[in-house]
Structure formats: structure tokens, C-alpha cells
Amino acid sequence: MDRLSVVDEIFLRTHRGLGTPIALQGLWRTADLVDPALLARLHALLSAGPLGRRVIRPRVPGARRAWQPTVRAHPLDYPNSPIPVAALLDWADAQGSSLDPEFDPGWRLSAVPLDDGGTVVALTCSHALADGRGLVHAADAALTAIASADSAVPAARFSPASDWSDAWRQWSIVLRGTARALRKGVPERPRPGIAAPLGKAHPDSAILQFSAREWDRLAAEHGGTANSLFIWSTAQLLWADGFPREVIEASLPVDTRDEPRTDNDLAMTSIAVTRSDDPATLREKAKAAYEYRMSSPGGMPEELLQVIPDRWAHALAAGAGERDILCSNIGTLPGSVRTLGPNRCTGVAARAIHPGLQHLPRTRLSGYLCRIGDDYLLSLVSPDPATPLAELIDALPLRIPMSRWS
């Protein structure tokens, strides 16, 4: 896509302090050291690939921001000194700083040795550049090139229409759509997030790895699927943490791609989870919800958010996609990401982090599920749990063995 979408711009505004900052992160863990030359090669391929783009502002009011190719990137960071395995997630959480595809490079590749003899590698990017599947596609392209000894990966190519024609298109959509929406009255604003200072919070993360066969078996025993068991488990964790209401609203991202590409190509839906729900009932709720996506408030055209000033756009859409929990099922990862050159990965996880978070969002717990080979990996991120995630996980009534990354 040559111009930023509405979703792209929502995530771009978070770099200006408008909303919850989100960076996507892929994590590879190996049992041995990864060759710095291999990571340098991976860094070069990523720089020349679809992540290699930056945002340029339009010169005509109403035109959308555009994408432009760039090879500018944060340098590869791979220190010699190992860190304790127990500090793995603290290190990974710190890799989201200074990611801004307009004023700074939008992505970073970094790695660090572990004191167990292994390595953890992190590919982190601004959510304005890609969603979870988009980041997977970018990594897939680069790692496939390494495995096949190709010299390059397909780069993003942009030839946006003129600012004048784009502005005409945007204003035409906005004016017609707003007139139609206002015939039904002034729309209500979405429920905002909780503006509690981060200084009072204690962010926490966890990554769990377990047998896909056992997880699927447990889901089937309860009449559910791997996805509905995932949603149920995330809700149970939030209640175990003291969530006071009887109903938890869960936000569910939906991949809307018709072909592999590195973009934000997703919609959002939601379901209400009650204490009486189980994986079977959540399976039916999720199936119905995927047919009905969240839309802009009151039927207003979403393009309105791209023709008004950023602060106005943020105020209009604040909290629109946030619910009590987020359950993002990223799906099965391609075989290319199971190895880093000759190094076979003991695990590959995908998640989002919140660098520079200043206020607590409404979303109190986010879960990210992906499958790699015979395993599922569940990544959990909470901006402020009352109880450490490790203790909450121990209390989950799941009868399958799980290993933790730290």
C-alpha cells in the first residue's frame, strides 16, 4: 500500500504520546551461539526488504501520509557478554525504544547470549509498519533468502498518486460519509482507557511453551478449539488477578489479508466472556464475532481520522479498539523461521510490547498465541498485574506440562 491506512496512522500517533504505544516483536531462542555474521546478513536483508520504509508527510491538506523506501535502520546490537536466562524478557522488553518510522528507524534487530550457552534474537518493529502476521512475512522473506543463498529479498515498491488526487479522494469520502452519519444524530464517543500513571504500575511478561497435541486434546475435551481455549485461559488469568466485573470484554484481531504482505491488514472484533463460559461456548461466540467487525463510531467514515489534526483524531477514536483483554492468535508460523542459518531454534514467540507507556490502557492483559512445529507458544503481557504472572499461571487449571522462557 502506497499510503498509510487508518490503522497505520492510529499506531503512528502512539509515537506522539497519543494512545497506547505498541511494538511488535518476534523472539527466537537457540541452544547455542548464533554467528554474528549470520545476524549481520539477516539485518541487511531486512533493511532492503518490506520493513525498509519510512513515512513522509503530504503537502496538501487532506492527503494521507505516504510510504517511501529507506535502508536507514538501527544498527545490529549483539554484545559479547551473556545475560542470565532469568533476565531474558527484561532484555526483550527494552528493545522497543526509539522505533518511529517517521522520525527514527521503525524496526530493530538485536541479540544477546544467554548464560545457558544459548542465544535470544529479537526482531522488533513499530506497529505502524506491520501487524503480527506482517512481521512474520518480513522475517519469512529474509530467512528464506538466507536458507536459499539468495542475494536479496523483494523490496517494498511505492508509487503513490499525487497529494492533490489523494486529498480529493479523501475529502469526497469524508464529506459524503459524514453527512450520511449525521442524519442519524451525533455519535457517542467510545469508552476511553484508564488514565492511571505508569509510575504506579509494575509491567510483567511471560512466555509459555507447550505441546500442541496436548493443548488441542484439552481443547477438544471441553468442546472447544485451540483458539477458544486460549481466550478462556486469558480471561481466567485476569479474574485470578482480581478483575472485579463478572463479564470480561475480549478484543480479537482478525487477519484480513488476501495475500502475504507486510502491512497492517487486520480488523477487530470482540466478545463478552462470562464466568460460566467454557471453551465450547467461547468457540461459538468467537465464530459469530468474526462475522461482525468493529466499525468507526456512529457510522462516521474512518477516513475522517486522516484529514483532521492528530490530536482531534486521537480524541475521536480514543479507546475504540481497547477491551479488557486482547487475544491475538497469530497462527502457525512458516517453517523458515524455525532456524537461524545452521542454528535450530528451541522456540519462536511472537508478541507485542509497550515501549514508553505513560498511562495504563483499558486492556489489562494481552495474550499472543502462535504455533511452531509441534509446540504452541503463549506470550502474555500485562501493564500492571496485581499478582505476578508466574503465580497466576500456576493457578490455571490446565493439565498439561508447560515450560517458561525465564
Image (spheres, rainbow, N blue to C red):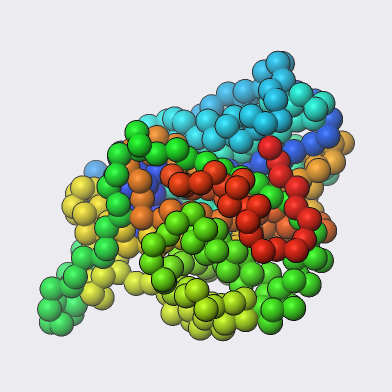
Q: Position of residue 12 (x, y in %)?
A: 37, 45
Residue at position x 54%, y 44% in the image: 388
Q: Position of residue 147 (x, y in %)?
A: 82, 42
Residue 88 shows in this picture: yes
Q: Closer to the camera, 100 or 397?
A: 397
Q: Is residue 269 above or below residue 372?
A: below
Residue 51 shows in this picture: no
Residue at position x 30%, y 69% in the image: 296
Q: Is residue 16 above or below residue 134?
A: above
Q: Closer to the camera, 198 or 4?
A: 198
Q: Position of residue 196 (x, y in %)?
A: 29, 44
Indicate the quadrant containing the C terminus: top left, top right, bottom left or bottom right: top right
Q: Closer to the camera, 35 or 393?
A: 393
- Determine which quarter of the picture holds residue 397: bottom right
Q: Is residue 324 above or below residue 199?
A: below
Left or right placement of residue 224 versus residue 176 in this view: right
Left or right placement of residue 121 versus residue 32 in this view: left
Q: Position of residue 93 (x, y in %)?
A: 54, 35
Left or right placement of residue 153 versus residue 316 in this view: right
- Determine which quarter of the picture holds residue 89: top right
Residue at position x 73%, y 57% in the image: 376
Q: Is residue 233 above or below residue 387?
A: below
Q: Closer to the camera, 337 or 368?
A: 368
Residue at position x 50%, y 35% in the image: 96
